[in-house]
Image (cartoon, helix red, strand yellow):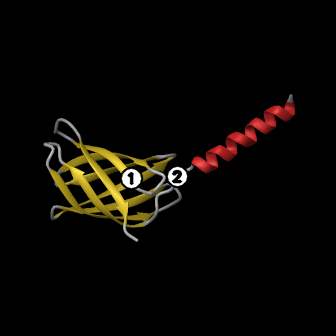
Amino acid sequence: MKKIIVAAALLLAAASAVNAQTVNAGKYTVEGTNLDGSSYSGTAEITLASETTCVIEWDTAGEKSTGVCMLNGNAFAAAYVLGDALGLIVYKVNGDGTLEGNWTITGKDGSGTETLTEVN
């Protein structure tokens, strides 16, 4: 019985390692939709601060914003300041390295979408 439990634990650990996602530091292209459904594009740069935390800076539609971000499994979230509003975006980390997210800002209804693609 102990052997079965140990084997199951090892398989779970191996599966977790295989499914573990990562986000790379560097530059990304940004494609997204605003709260009203209109599209925008730009760039973002991620700078790692630790194994799970980072700083992200966006430059979209001539507007710059900066946020603090964190990776947890295949979820990557960032809180940011845009003008005088606070925002939150939660991305799903895909196997190909793209980040697909939904975002919102304080005082506004709805959410927008955003995809980050690493620039090689």
* Quarter residue 56 falls in: bottom left
Residue at left 21%, top 41%?
106
Expressed as whole percent of the image width and height from the top left, the position of residue 102 reads: 30, 43
Q: Residues within 10 Å of mark 2 (few under 14, many from 20)?
A: many
The mark that comes first in sequence, 2 or 1, is 2
Residue at left 75%, top 36%?
8
**Closer to the camera in the image, 108 or 28:** 28
Q: Which residue is mark 1?
A: 99
Expressed as whole percent of the image width and height from the top left, the position of residue 45 reads: 34, 65
* Quarter residue 112 falls in: top left
Identify the element where label 2 is drawn.
loop
Expressed as whole percent of the image width and height from the top left, the position of residue 93 reads: 44, 50
Q: Is residue 3 above or below residue 27?
A: above
**Closer to the camera in the image, 6 or 70:** 6
Q: Is residue 3 above or below residue 39?
A: above
**Closer to the camera in the image, 86 or 39:** 39
Expressed as whole percent of the image width and height from the top left, the position of residue 49 reads: 46, 62
* Quarter residue 7 falls in: top right
| Marks 2 and 1, how far apart at CA | 11 Å
Left-right relation of 111 to 76: left
Q: Amino acid at mark 2?
A: Gln
Q: Amino acid at mark 1?
A: Leu
Mark drawn on residue 7: none
Identify the element where label 1 is drawn.
strand
Image quarter hosting the N terminus: top right
Q: Is residue 50 above or below residue 70?
A: below
Residue at left 15%, top 65%?
62
Farthest top residue in view:
1
Q: Which residue is mark 2?
A: 21
